[in-house]
Image (cartoon, coloured by chain):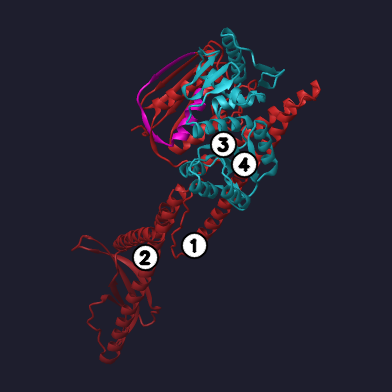
Amino acid sequence: MKLLTRTNRFYLIFILLLSPIMIAVDYYIIRYFVYTEVNDILKHESERIISYAESENALLPSSYIDNTLQVKETYQLAPSFRDTLIFDSHFNKLIPYRKFDFVVQVGDEKMKVTVKHILLEAKKLILWLFLSTVFILALMLVGLFLINQKISSWAWGPFYRNLSKLKKYDITQKNRVHLEASGISEFEALNQVISSLMNQVENDFQNLKEFNENISHEMQTPLAIIRNKMVLLLESQSLKEKEFQWVQAAYQEVNKLSKIGKSLTLISRIENQEFTRMDSIDLRATIDNIIGNMEEIVQFKKLEMTAKLDQVKVKCDPILANILFTNLIKNAIQHNREGGYIRMQLNEEKFEIENSGQVLNTGTAQLFHRFQKGNTATDSLGLGLAINQRICEIYGFKLDYTHQDGQHIFSLFFRNQAE
Amino acid sequence: MKILVIEDNVELLHDIRDFLEREGNVCEIANNYESAYMKVGIFPYDILVVDITLPDGNGLDIIRETKKENIDVGIIIISAKNALEDKIKGLEIGADDYLTKPFYLPELNARINALYRRKVYKGSKEILFNEIKIKPERYEVFIHDQPLSLTKKEFDILHFFVANKNRLLTKEAIAEHLWGDHIEMADSFKFIYTHLANLRKKIAGLGGNDYIKSIYRVGYKFTDRE
């Protein structure tokens, strides 16, 4: 849920809870003031009547007087207020009145006088209060909503823009994210934290990359020397049978190490985006060329190879295209059984290579990981597919793998890449 | 031929020199930019083997300098970096070939020979080994002057063997020569074995000698010595 929606929701709940309380409070306050006002009017009128009676010895003809009653000399009455309903025949309904009883001496007569004043109708009052309150609250709500909206676009704008920048952030790309300044201290603090985090991550990534590169570069020269010396050892005829075997085994391992180094270097070079050429590659020619290079080993394994290749052009680096398809075809040859088959198909949408082979136990995802081998019996290093995966990531290709009963299918989808 | 090898690692430098001298070449060495620069300025070489990353300079500068003086020199770059820009740049400024470390010495030797032939004889030179005659630019082989029909890979193997006669060629070196860098194939050794058997048969069929000696589990040697 968006922060704005959540705040608005809380505002709404708050106002819904607040409105009855406001109405009640308003009602009692207004009632209090009305009563005080009416009391004052009635009291004042009573005083006027009393003073008039004292000076004029007559009853003031006041419109407030409700009724008068002659009482005995001994009658005692504390002046008091009371509420009452009086039926108004004109309106045909009961109307609330405030009454005030007091005693006045008019000449010789003692009289109980009742003055009255109309009160506001409670029901009406509450209704109007309710309506006006609701109206005011609604105005407030709309106002708050608009203000929030404004704040959101103004204050949260940089936040959302930064967020979308961060979403696009990819550490393997060399483009830095420049966070927009918002002038709001919380966001600035967040930006700072993110920036320093990114710096740290980038540094670590850079270090790791350099380490990878260096270790695969730097080991090549020593490996070359070791290898040369071993060949010299193997050439010298002074080795005993057993020693010869040891050197030979060591030689093989050195070769493996060197291949690993080369493959890792290739992977880091792909990740470093050293292959930036975007040529229009004729895939059919590329594949035909690779098949030509492998032809004899295909015959040697007695594989039945069929290729149905359309003319397809894809934009990518020629070296990477060559590596990608070489790896796929090489894989199909290597993990095949003798007398098996390879079927290739190339069209605008995809390249599909299908081969017979052993039943695999590895999952698809694992297969693309470095050093994952489908078959431990062979000497392959399992880096080929990891390299392919990297290449596919660069160009937005998708490499799928399925296998069933010893039939293996790699599908390479070009996605919008084909021209 | 006269070769200058420029490489900062002295041990590797000596390996290369020893290997090339055994092939009957005159091989000089330089392990830094300065001495290399001096040597190419004074002596004419047929082939330069240049490592790009030198402690005190860039091998590419040496290539530029050499090309100014002597346009005919053959240049092979050796580099541990296998960086594309280096390769493209090197070839642009006049290098002829590029090898990534670690390379097999027989591979370097074969490349040097091929380059030398291209440069000096414009590729027309035949390679002779007793009764075997190879015309590399036309992919033709003759045994006792009779044409030998070979597949592409058989031809490559034979050519590689003859270029590195009397040397131990490991199966790995042969496989890399045949299929290049990024291919490692379990089947390739079996393949080599079978094709060598075919090759022997074909050569014997035309009355040629069997010069291919197999060195137990390691590789092969092409030799007419016992």
- Disc 3 marks a residue whose amino acid type is Leu
Badge 2 and badge 4 both on one subunit: no
Q: Is residue A98 left or right of residue B196?
A: left
The numbered dot on residue B5 is: 4
Chain of the residue under label 4: B
Q: Which residue is mark 2?
A: A27
> Crowding at label 2, few (<14), some or many (≥20) Cα neighbours within 10 Å?
some
Rendering colour (chain A): red
Viewer-nearest residue: A122 or A218: A218
Name which of mark 4 and mark 3 comes first in the sequence. 4
The numbered dot on residue B99 is: 3
In space, the residues marked 1 and 3 are separated at their CA atoms by 52 Å
Q: Which residues are magenta?
A: A304-329
In space, the residues marked 2 and 3 are separated at their CA atoms by 96 Å
Secondary structure beneath dot 3 equals strand
Q: Is residue A417 within the magenta segment?
A: no
- Disc 2 marks a residue whose amino acid type is Tyr
**Quarter assignment of residue A363:** top right
> Crowding at label 1, few (<14), some or many (≥20) Cα neighbours within 10 Å?
some
Mark 2 or mark 1, whichever is nearer to me: 1
- Disc 1 marks a residue whose amino acid type is Glu
Secondary structure beneath dot 1 equals helix
Viewer-nearest residue: B20 or A398: B20
Judging by colour alone, the chain drawn in cyan in this rendered image is B
In space, the residues marked 2 and 4 are separated at their CA atoms by 105 Å
- Decide: is A113 above or below A347: below
Chain of the residue under label 3: B
Does residue A112 appear in this view? no
Mark 1 or mark 3, whichever is nearer to me: 3
